[in-house]
Amino acid sequence: MVILQKPGEAVMVPVAFHPENPVERTRLAEVTERALKERQGVVLRLEAPAGEEARCQLAHPLQVDGEPRGVVGLELEPRPEAQLRVAMRDLQWGSGWLEVLLRRHADPQEAARQRLKLALDLVAALLEQEGLNEGGTAFATEIATRLGCDRVALGVLKGGRIRLRALSHSGQFNKRANLMRAIELAMDEAVDQRETVVCPPPAEATPQVTLAHSQLLRESEAGAALTLPLARGENMVGALTLERPAGFTFDKASLDLCDAVAAVAGPIVELKVAAERNLAVHALDAVAALWRKISGPRHPGIKLAAAGTALAALFFTFATGDFRVSAESTVEGEIQRVISAPINGFVKEAPRRAGDTVKKGEVIGRFDDRELKLERVKLVGQSTQYGQQVREAMAQRNRAQAGIVLAQLDQAQAQLALIDEQLARTEMVAPFDGVIISGDLSQKLGAPVERGQALFEVAPLDSFRIALRVDERDFGQVVPGQKGELAVTAIPNQRFAFVVTRITAVNTAKDGRNTFRVEARLDGEPGRLRPGMEGVGKVYIDERRLVWIWSHSLIEWLQLWLWSWLP
C-alpha cells in the first residue's frame, strides 16, 4: 500500500494497493502510522497460530526535504532474517524512486529549488568530515541512499589518471580489484570527454563513447551507470560514478540532481585534495600561482612589487658595505692599582670614595692608630729600661747579664720599628693621579678590616683600554691593528675611536654565548670616558657584499648543523 499527502492539505490518503482487496486495506495501518511517526523504516512481526511462522509487515516513510509526504507499507510471507533485511533495503530504494516522482510532478520552480536544496544536503556530507577519504565515503553513501544506487564511487584526478578515493557503504576497499579498476576506467572515459556519460544512454542523448561504462556494467551486473566529471572552472578535479541495480535507469530528474551535486562538489573536492598536499607542494603551487600573476595579464600591483623586489635583490647582491664585528665593551684603566689593608684594624676616616678624582699622595683613607701609639709608648719605655739594665750590668762587669739584657733591648727596638712602620701605613694614599673606580669606606667607619683586604681600586684618568667581549662566531675575523669605534651607554651620541692591540685566549660563557676577550687602546682623547663605563664596540674588518654581511651568520650556522648530522 502507498499512502501520500493530499495536495494542499496535511491529510494522508491511500493512493495504491496490491492486490486490490478493499477488505484488507486496514491491515497495514499500524506499521505505516509508526513509520510516519518515527520517520524511519519499521518492521513488525504478526502473531501466528501455533506451529506456523509469523508474517512480517514493513513500512518506510517518503520524505521530501525532511518533511513526510507519504509512506509505503507491505506485508510479506514468512522468510529468514537475511531475506527480510534485503526486502527492507529494496523498500528503501523504491521509496527513493517515489520521492523523485513526487519532486518531478511538483511546480517547476519549486522542483528546481528542492533539487538545489537536496544537492546541498548531499554535499554537506562531504564537508562534515575533515579528510577526503572520510568525507568522500559519507558523501558517496548519502548519494547512494537518497538516489537508490547500488554503488557510488568518488575518484580524484592525479597524474593524468583517475584514482579511486571513496566508495559508498565501505570505508576500505581493494583498489587493485577488477571492479575497482573498471570504475576508474569509466571515470577516465567521462573525464576525457569532459561531459556526463550515461550507460545505457537515453534515447534522445547525443552519441558518446561508453566502452568503459559497458564493461563496468558487465563486471558489476548493474542495470545502469552514470559518471559525472568534477571540475573547478576549466580544470578537471575528479569524477563521480553511480550504479543502479538491474531494471533501473537514470531519468532526467535524477540527471539534473546529479549535475547540481557535481557542480557544487567539484570545488570542494579540489580544496580537500589541496589540503592533503605536503608543504613542499603547497610552496610550489604558491610560486606557480604567483608566477602566473606576474607573467600574465592584469595584476599591475603584483608586477610592480615583483619588479621592486627584483631590483632590491640585485642591489643588495652586488652592493658592498663595511663589515664590522659588534661586541659588548667595557672601559678599563690601562693601569689599575689595588689599595689593600696593610694591618688588622678599624676604619677611622674615609674622605674619598669611588668616583672621586685624586692626586698622587692624597690621603683617601685612614685607620685608627690609637692602639699602635699606646703600643709604641710601651715599647719606648721598655727600650729605655733595657738600656739602663745594660749599663748596670756593664758597670758590675757581669757580661752574661749584659748579653741577655742587650738581646731584650734589640727585641724591643725591633718591635718598635715594626710599630713605626704600621703607624706609617695607617694612612692610605693615592699612588698616582687618577680616579677611584671602586671602594667606599664612608659607610664603614669604625668597622674592622683584615690585613690584605682590598679597599680601593685606582685607575689613571688619561690612560684607558677597551675590553671587548667578541662572540666566538666572529672571533676569527678580529686581528691586532684593526680599527673600530666605541659607543658607551652614558654618552650614546659620541663615538670614540680605538685600535685593537691584543687578542687573548680568555673566554667567558654568559647567557648561552661563548665570548673571547679582545683588548684595544683609545685612538684619541678620552674626553668624558671613565673606567667602568660599558657600551658597544664595533671593529671594522673590511668591505664586503651586503648580502653576505646579512646572511653569513645563518649560512655558517647551517653549515655547522649539517656537519653535525652528516655521517
Image (cartoon, rainbow, N blue to C red):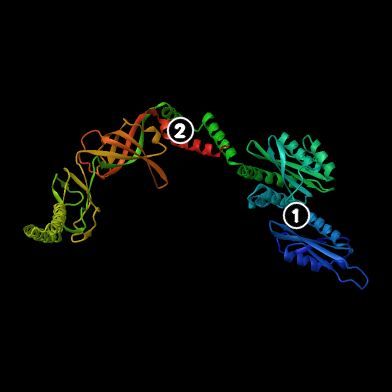
**Between discs 2 and 1, the one toward the N terminus:** 1
- Measured as percent of width and height from the top left, residue 441 is found at 20, 56
Q: Which residue reaches farthest left?
A: 395
Q: Can residue 11 be seen in this snapshot?
A: no
- Measured as percent of width and height from the top left, residue 207 is found at 78, 34
Q: Point out the image quarter for the N terminus.
A: bottom right
- Name the foreground residue: 78 vs 557: 557
Residue hosting label 2: 305
Q: Point out the image quarter for the C terminus.
A: top right
Residue hosting label 1: 99
Residue visible at 26% across and 38% down? 465
- Give the quadrant of residue 371: bottom left
- Measured as percent of width and height from the top left, residue 46 is found at 85, 69
- Name the foreground residue: 41 vs 288: 288
Q: How crowded is mark 2: few (under 14 residues within 10 Å), some or many (20 or more)?
A: few
Q: Which amino acid does label 2 sit on?
A: Ala
384 lies above or below 546 = below
Q: Which amino acid does label 1 sit on?
A: Glu
Instruction: Using residue 42 as the reference point, say whether residue 437 is left or right of it.
Output: left
Instruction: Using residue 211 as the reference point, say whether residue 290 is left or right of it.
Output: left
- Name the foreground residue: 171 vs 14: 171
